Image (cartoon, rainbow, N blue to C red):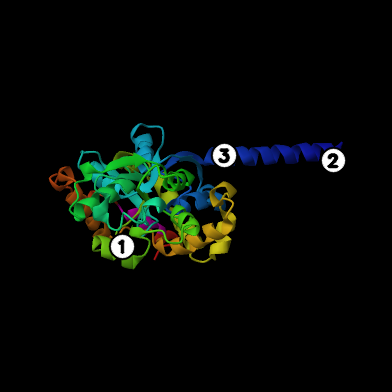
Amino acid sequence: MKNTIARLAGALLALTLTTSLAAAQTKITVAVGGGACLCYLPTVLAKQLGEYEKAGLNVDLVDLKGGSDALKAVLGGSADVVSGYFDHCVNLAAKKQELQAFVVYDRYPGLVLVVAPSHTADIKSIKDLAGKKVGVSAPGSSTDFFLKYLLKKNGIDPAGTAVIGVGLGATAVAAMEQGQIDAAVMLDPSVTVLKGSHPDLRILSDTRTQKDTLETFGGEYPGGALYSTAAWVAGHEKEVQALTNAMLSTLAWIHSHSPEEIMAKMPEEMVGKNKGLYLAALKNTIPMFSETGKMDPKGADAVLAVFSVGSPEVANAKIDVSKTFTNKFVEQAKKTTGSAK
């Protein structure tokens, strides 16, 4: 009888602790602009490592086709935070919509403009894309912005190029191999997967390294970040701090573990069947991940400069880019945990 009572008491205590923990965790929905893309790996890895839970959050990651769809989810109220490219914060500022990034996990955008294998012979430069069909993750996404910037920079009217949404993962690779499009803006692991099957793959522009990013943009250009509306950030500082802490812990984990150890933590469906190619892509991507989580103000200025070239609306909006990001949550994490440099 005593044993039965003890077991019941133990079960009741466990249930109470579990219920208390669940009650203590705040539910947050994060819309991801294409979870299979390695540029978003820190967001997914934080979930795999249990970092959100450690920070007191119950995070639901919603995987969407592209950054523009993730942004729509937050603006429409079905998600709280976007895990997507910072440039949306700048672009929306021109439309008087205030968005604010609070932790940056990509130092470089990692965007790659690739020619479809069947068009290697006839498309040799960006100028050759005039009148062609070019794939992007989704119209209005960062891949689309990047394409328009490159076209404009090379004297091509973006309106003369057909933009087609093909996603970021297997759908983008299939569209390229099946000749549905003539070129595409892609990210890893898709670029490495495609090159694995087509060694002579032609790359017209590459921003996976600091050198290539500087050549393309003239300065560092931040990619993926966690952001939301300025109103949500201001009204949910506890949750924003918790998300920042989780992301900084994840970035520190990435930079203290091997690519093989990182891959082992990722969901099987994201790694795919060809682990060798995924690992190769991951090794290419790791230098892209931030070590500090901070936004470099010069990088934010570079984003504004790029958009001003491709968008008269942005150029004429007199945007105060300093309002599109904040480093205060990263700074606070540094003070309390020493996790940021």
- Secondary element at image label 1: helix
Q: What residue appears at the point 44 percent right and 57 percent down from the top-left corner?
A: 248
Whether residue 264 is visible to the viewer of this picture, yes or no, is yes
State yes or no: discs 1 and 3 in contact (Cβ < 8 Å). no
Q: Which label number is shown at residue 22? A: 3
Whether residue 207 sits left or right of residue 49 in the image: it is left
Q: Which residue lies furthest to the front in this view?
A: 121
Q: What residue appears at the point 67 percent right and 38 percent down from the top-left corner?
A: 15
Query: How far, Cα to Cα, is label 2 from label 3?
Result: 28 Å
| Residue that mark 2 sits on | 3
Counting the numbered discs, the total is 3
Foreground of the two, 298 or 187: 187
Q: Does the magenta stretch include residue 328?
A: yes
Check the picture and name the quadrant holding the C terminus: bottom left
Whether residue 320 is visible to the viewer of this picture, yes or no, is no
Residue 334, image quadrant: bottom left
Instruction: Write down the region rendered in magenta.
Output: 326-333
Q: In this view, does 325 lie above or below 213?
A: above
Q: Is residue 55 magenta?
A: no
Query: How far, Cα to Cα, is label 1 from label 3?
Result: 43 Å
- Secondary element at image label 2: helix
Amino acid bearing label 2: Asn
